[in-house]
Image (cartoon, rainbow, N blue to C red):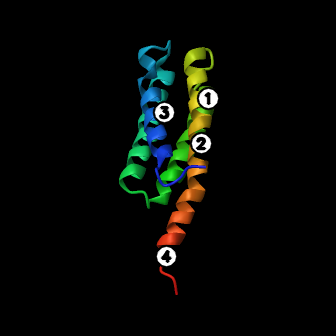
Amino acid sequence: MFNDSRAQDFLAVVLGAFTALSPLWLNTNSNARWTLIVLGVLIAATGLVQMARASMASADYAMGLFGVLLFISPWAMDFTAFRGAAWTAWVVGVVTAVVAVAALPAMSQRLHNMAPHH
């Protein structure tokens, strides 16, 4: 889906920053606020790590995990009543997981191309 431009890493940084900053304009409780901040920072950090070290495949897996955790967080952290925060978590969580999965074939192809040919 993505090519070597690593657009998915930039998108992850934007999604993470948006999520981490969203408590500034959304109505939240303490659970929602800290969940959005922490997972948003982690998602942005995985994007930055991938930008710096594109060969680090574990960052794509971590990004996918953080996306899934963000998606389930409104139920797990009990903030579904805060609709804006919950919808932010659901939408950004799904998009982050999709971006991470889309990056995996590109990563495996890149690693395969880096392997010495015998």
Residue at image x 35%, y 53%? 52
Give the left or right position of residue 52, taking residue 27 as reference: left
Give 73 or 12, whichever is nearer the viewer: 12
Contact (CB < 8 A) between labels 1 and 3? Answer: no
The amino acid sitting under disc 2 is Ala
Query: Is 108 above or below relative to 37?
Result: below
- Residue type at mark 3 is Leu
The residue that label 3 is drawn on is 15
* On screen, residue 59 above or below 87: below
Mark 1 → mark 4, Cα distance in angstroms: 38 Å
Mark 1 is on which residue type? Trp
Mark 3 vs mark 4, foreground winner is 4
Label 1, on which residue? Answer: 90
Tell me which amino acid carries mark 4. Ala
Mark in the foreground, 1 or 3: 3
* Comes first in the chain, label 3 or label 2: 3
CA gap between label 3 and label 4 equals: 32 Å
Q: Earlier in the sequence, mark 2 or mark 1?
A: 1
Q: Which mark is residue 64?
A: none
Residue 97 is labelled as 2
Mark 3 and mark 2: Cα distance apart in space: 11 Å
The 10 Å Cα crowd at callout 1, few under 14, some 14 to 19, many 20 or more, is many
Sequence order check: which comes first, mark 1 or mark 3?
3
What element does badge 3 sit on?
Answer: helix
Identify the mark nearer the N-term, 2 or 4.
2
